[in-house]
Amino acid sequence: YRRNPVELDKIRRTIDVIRNDSDTRITSLSIKGYASPEGSYANNERLAKGRTDALAGYVDGLYEFPSGLISTSWEAEDWDGLRKYVEGSGLEGCDGILAIIDSSLAPDARERKLKTSYPGQYKFLLENVYSGLRHSDYRVEYVIRSYTDVDEIASVMRTSPQKLSLHELFVLAQSLEPGSDAYNEVFEVAVRMYPDSELANLNAASTALLRRDTAAAARYLSRAG
């Protein structure tokens, strides 16, 4: 239906990339379904739950995951998604619409007030936005095995650096000549993979100073705590 084949293929490719990697193991797959605020809350809850169960059944039928690996939840109406759209839309009466969305009214009363207070805007949202609020989100969690051999760490760094922890990168650095190109490269990779790590930024700043690259050092030090 509509873009479902494309979106289902994205889910399959996400899972397959992890399943086909001998270094990784999927630990959980969570799916959460939503319906739009159109219609009664009770019916939308039924739709959101049905959407979730259908996708979970589809995925489980493809892979036959162990029992308990897939978890599901649902939210009857995606008011947060509607709010996010309205907030950035520039719709006439935007502030009033947001006030209704943020109100303490029950969902069905909230939708009625939105429809009666802003009929033109409601029609626009119904025709152009609500379909996107009927969706399922999914999250795949996985673990990557540890690496201890420095030659293997060096090989993984060249091909899949996102698999390495900071500790593993530092283990590799300790096996190299301080100040060498290879040594400096490890810390450049570390700060690229972990841009918010104070330790990674501090080490990258130190290697930049050794190269007398003060501009890079200043950039790293600004994130080094």
Image (cartoon, helix red, strand yellow):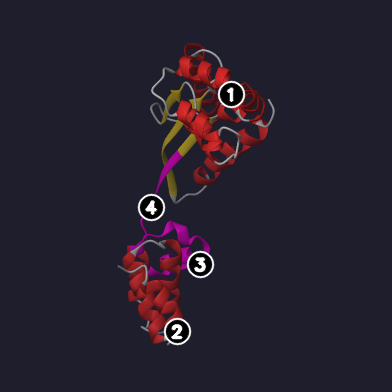
- Looking at the rendered structure, the secondary structure element under dot 2 is loop
* Circles 1 and 4: CB atoms closer than 8 Å: no
Q: Residue at x 49, y 32 (%)?
A: 98
Outermost residue, right side:
2
Is 127 drawn above or below residue 40 in the view shown? below
Residue ID for mark 4: 145
Amino acid type, mark 3: Arg
Picture quarter containing residue 73?
Answer: top left
Q: Residue at x 36, y 56 (%)?
A: 146
Residue ID for mark 1: 118
Q: Is residue 165 magenta?
A: yes
The residues tagged by marks 4 and 2 sit, at their Cα atoms, a distance apart of 35 Å
* Circles 4 and 2: CB atoms closer than 8 Å: no
Q: Nearer the viewer, mark 3 or mark 2?
A: 2
Give the residues drawn in magenta, as a range. Answer: 140-166
Can residue 101 be seen? yes
Residue ID for mark 3: 158
The residues tagged by marks 3 and 2 sit, at their Cα atoms, a distance apart of 24 Å
* Circles 2 and 1: CB atoms closer than 8 Å: no
Q: Earlier in the sequence, mark 4 or mark 2?
A: 4
